[in-house]
Amino acid sequence: MLKWVRTNHKYNADGSSELRYEAKGTDCVIESRKRAIPHANGVGSWWHTAYFVIRPDGTETAYITRKRAMEAVEEESR
């Protein structure tokens, strides 16, 4: 089991944010991206967070939960 550490947290002016998690023993990182998604009627928005596994070659895979993203990295590093 890898020990994950938050290494970066960036807040943007529009309220969105990015968090980056890294662990020893793997070259992959996990990035959490929170974005405002506009409502269909055009009034207001709702917040959505997706978790991206970023590999050393630059490819990314999105996951709905951080737990699932961490499990995916651990499965790849075996």
Image: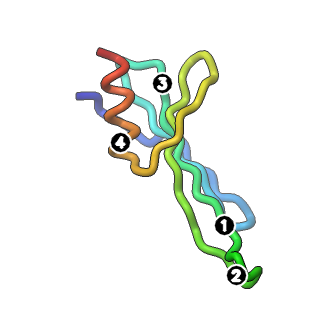
How many residues crowd mark 1 within 10 Å: few (<14), some (14–19), many (20+)? few
The disc label shown at residue 28, or none: 3
Q: Does residue 26 lie above or below 37 as drawn?
A: above
CB of mark 3 within 8 Å of CB of mark 4?
A: no
Left or right position of 62 against 22: right
Upstream in sequence: badge 2 or badge 1: 1
Of circles 3 and 4, the one toward us is 4
Q: Secondary structure at mark 1?
A: strand
Label at residue 44: 2
Furthest residue to the front? 40
Distance between mark 1 and mark 3 Cα atoms: 27 Å
Instruction: Give the label on residue 68, or none.
Output: 4
- Between the C-alphas of marks 3 and 2, the distance is 35 Å
Q: Residue at x 32, y 34 (%)?
A: 71
Q: Position of residue 55 (x, y in %)?
A: 54, 23
Rendered location of residue 76, percent (x, y): 37, 20
Q: Quadrant of the N terminus?
A: top left
Q: What residue occupies the far left of the structure in this picture?
A: 1
Task: Indicate the quadrant where residue 8 lies.
Answer: top right
Viewer-proximal residue, 64 or 77?
A: 64
Q: Are marks 2 and 1 in contact (CB under 8 Å)?
A: no
Image height of 3 relative to 26, above or below: below
Residue type indicated by callout 4: Arg
- Per the image, label 3 sits on a secondary structure element best described as loop
